Image (tube, helix red, strand yellow):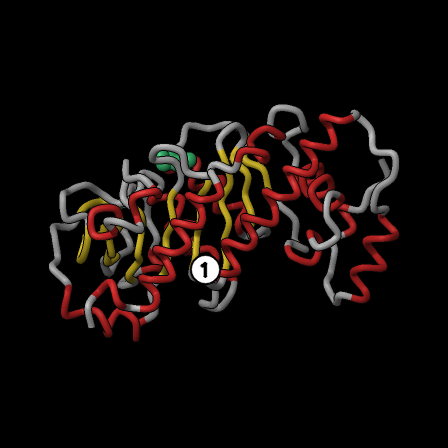
Amino acid sequence: MRFLDAEFVQGFIRMANDGWEQGWHERNGGNLSYRVKPEEVESVKENFEAKEWKPIGTSVPNLAGEYFLVTGSGKYFRNVIIKPEDSICMIEVDDKGENYRIVWGLVNGGRPTSELPSHLMNHEVKKLATNGKYRVIYHAHTTNVIALTFVLPLEDKVFTRELWEMATECPVVFPDGVGVVPWMVPGGRDIAVATSELMKKYDVAIWAHHGMFAAGEDFDLTFGLMHTVEKSAEILVKMLSMQPNKRQTITPQNFRDLAVDFKVTLPEEFLYEK
Ligand code: 2HA
Ligand code: ZN
């Protein structure tokens, strides 16, 4: 099969373009990665041309031998749909989880996303926590969430509760809540460690004054999660722009009632009295 004809590649390209159309990927902002299934690797293997091994910059032993489809460093999401072979690549992780090599894509040179350490450390945490079900890690520069990191305390419980209150679907879509990473230098191992720690508990990690990471089973669920959190943030920004206080809202008891009917567990730590 031609590499670009594979369904997982098409799904990846569509998701990247959806993010671009949302306005979350100015210039080369944001990055996306997908842990490819063994049968999908098999289906496109004839197109592989392995390049040299390079250090990942961190260690992910539980991802040894895995293949990932990832956006390229410095590449623009808006170009993924028109020149995928220049904008994205497939990489293979070595048998120690310390090095990677490109096996397809980035035909004009380049490397995988600058956030590769964060992507792979998040994949490792999620692979272990979900028995291999989660396959997508997505980083976007979501405008409203970023704006909120200038006015809300950078605390998991504040962001979770405020985002939950802005739309009834939110506690159902992200019942575990969201984590917040304080401002850190992006691209390296330190921010990757901080983010992957939060990913043990949450599917969403907010990077203060930068953006968001979301994790999920497939492209639809992961894009939908990013979209839901960002839409809720947009409602909060609008609300705060009208007046500083809510006249009425969804109460802690309302959330408990919702949890029963929708069969989700909402941790009491987020249902505090204000
Ligand atoms: O430029 O978003 O965090 C890609 C990024 C870095
Ligand atoms: Zn970024």
Camera-side residue: 81 or 262?
Answer: 81
Which quarter is ligand 2 in? top left
| Left or right of residue 86: residue 196 | right
The number of numbered discs placed on residues in the rendered structure image is 1
Figure check: 137 above or below 155: below
The residue drawn where x is 22% and y is 42% is 111
Residue 139 position by quadrant: top left
Residue at 48% in and 58% down: 126
Give the answer, above or below, for where 62 lies relative to 248: below
Residue 38 screen position, x and y as percent:
30, 72
For the question of whether residue 188 can be seen, the reply is no
Image quarter of the C terminus: top right
Q: Quadrant of the N terminus?
A: bottom left
- Residue 254 point in image, percent of width and height: 86, 53
Residue 218 relative to residue 171: left or right: left
Q: Which residue is mark 1?
A: 219
Q: Is the residue at mark 1 in contact range of ligand 1, meaning its CB lies under 8 Å from it?
A: no
Front residue of 205/250: it is: 250
- Percent from the top left, x then y, of residue 10? 33, 62
Q: Residue at x 80, y 46 (%)?
A: 271
**Which residue sits at x=51%, y=65%?**
130
Residue 101 in the image: above or below residue 42: above
In terms of secondary structure, where does tag 1 sit?
helix
One can see residue 258 in this view: yes
Q: Position of residue 194 (x, y in %)?
A: 49, 39
Amino acid tagged 1: Phe
Neighbours of disc 1 within 10 Å: few (<14), some (14-19), many (20+): many
Left or right placement of residue 115 versus residue 147 in this view? left
Q: Is residue 31 left or right of residue 73?
A: right
